[in-house]
């Protein structure tokens, strides 16, 4: 029996689903590149630590940097790998770990408390990065070589280790066109798209699976999760997909598209309608504040702007969300 046929057996599919074993469609070149990047990143960490310690064999290297290397070089576009997640998590975790080690007398309780508090702190600070938990743990159980550093542990080795790993991550991932770190540089390019099919498209589970299989870098999300997200998005679209009937200067409007087509515009100004001016000729001035053609400004008729705008939006907790329309929950 061929391997591909074996994978399609019901029992095998059930087992893979239960244990979370996703089909790995990442190319072999990408796997090798990720490994090479991790090697260079950790090499930079070790060499930096050796230099700071005067070449002695007692290198101050936080073990959690190995886990950070996996994320930065194997999943460079993932949210858990981005700069704020890396820097913020390690910094908070180091501070919390040292504090617990200093003020909680029982080492086992201090270790558990350090990790638990770090997880909550990372959540509140929006910098979830799993290796941060190990950084907090190391501050408690790292032995005398770590505990005698006190809060200096935050700067050396943690910050110096992160700086070395981060620098290599930026430079190394920039060598490959499909990789960019931070991920902002892969999506910040301008995409001049002014028209789109208003009828929308119909996507299937197979479409998501196909899209993931053709991504050159590892995607840290499963097809099932993408499909579930799409279902929620469709339900929300059907409930909120009304074009605005009136426009307000100073408000923000979204075209309701996805990917590089998505755009949010701020309505800067609009001409006054007088008895001598036809409403159909009313003009608006807008500025793109998010998404495609960022920071561009433009002039269009009010009616054209209404057709472009799917709904009015406001920014909340860093995300653009639709303004509830009358009659909608």
Image (tube, grey):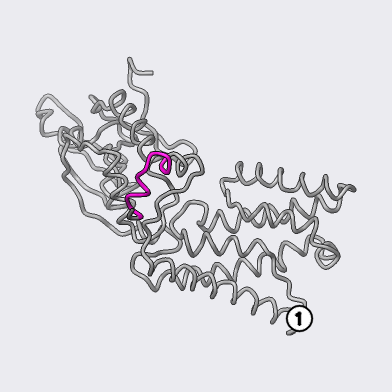
In the rendered image, residue 237, in percent from the top left (x then y), is placed at 30, 29
Whether residue 120 is in magenta: the answer is no
**Res. 140 image quadrant:** bottom right
Q: How many marks?
A: 1
Dominant secondary structure (helix, strand or loop) of the stretch shown in magenta: helix
Q: Which residues are magenta?
A: 3-13
User: Helix or strand or loop: what does disc 1 sit on?
Assistant: loop
Whether residue 9 is in magenta: the answer is yes
**Res. 232 image quadrant:** top left
Q: Residue at x 38, y 18 (%)?
A: 329
Position above or below: 246 against 92:
above
Q: Residues within 10 Å of mark 1 (few under 14, many from 20)?
A: few
Q: Which residue is mark 1?
A: 57
Whether residue 261 sits left or right of residue 104 in the image: it is left
Q: Residue at x 76, y 45 (%)?
A: 112
Whether residue 156 sits left or right of residue 78 in the image: it is right
In the rendered image, residue 196, in percent from the top left (x then y), is placed at 17, 43
Position above or below: 266 against 329:
below
Q: Residue furthest bottom?
A: 55
In the rendered image, residue 243, in percent from the top left (x then y), is placed at 23, 28
Viewer-proximal residue among 165 and 280? 165
């Amino acid at each position: 029996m061929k391997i591909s046929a074996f994978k399609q057996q019901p029992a095998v599919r059930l087992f893979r689903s239960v244990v979370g074993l996703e089909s790995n469609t990442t190319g072999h070149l990408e796997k090798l590149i990720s490994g090479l990047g991790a090697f260079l990143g950790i090499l930079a960490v070790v060499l930096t630590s050796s230099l700071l310690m005067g070449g002695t064999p007692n290198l101050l290297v936080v073990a959690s940097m190995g886990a950070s290397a996996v994320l930065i070089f194997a999943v460079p576009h993932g949210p858990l790998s981005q700069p704020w997640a890396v820097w913020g998590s390690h910094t908070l975790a180091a501070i919390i770990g040292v504090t617990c080690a200093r003020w909680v007398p029982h080492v086992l309780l201090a270790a558990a408390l350090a990790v638990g508090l770090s997880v909550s702190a990372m959540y509140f600070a929006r910098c979830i990065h799993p290796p941060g938990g190990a950084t907090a743990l190391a501050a408690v159980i790292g032995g005398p070589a770590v505990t005698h550093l006190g809060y200096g542990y935050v700067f050396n080795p943690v910050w110096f280790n992160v700086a070395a790993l981060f620098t290599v991550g930026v430079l190394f991932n920039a060598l490959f066109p499909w990789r960019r770190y931070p991920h902002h540089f892969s999506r910040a390019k301008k995409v001049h798209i002014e028209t789109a099919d208003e009828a929308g498209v119909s996507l299937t589970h197979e479409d998501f699976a196909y899209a993931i299989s053709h991504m050159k870098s590892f995607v840290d999300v499963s097809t099932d999760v993408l499909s579930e997200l799409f279902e929620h998005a469709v339900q929300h679209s059907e409930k909120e997909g009304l074009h605005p009937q009136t426009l307000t200067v100073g408000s923000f409007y979204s075209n309701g598209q996805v990917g590089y087509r998505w755009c949010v515009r701020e309505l800067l100004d609009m001409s006054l309608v007088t008895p001598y001016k036809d409403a159909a000729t009313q003009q608006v001035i807008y500025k793109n504040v998010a998404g495609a053609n960022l920071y561009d400004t433009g002039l269009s008729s009010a009616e054209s702007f209404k057709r472009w705008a799917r709904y009015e939006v406001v920014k909340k907790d860093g995300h653009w969300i639709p303004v509830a329309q009358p009659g909608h929950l």
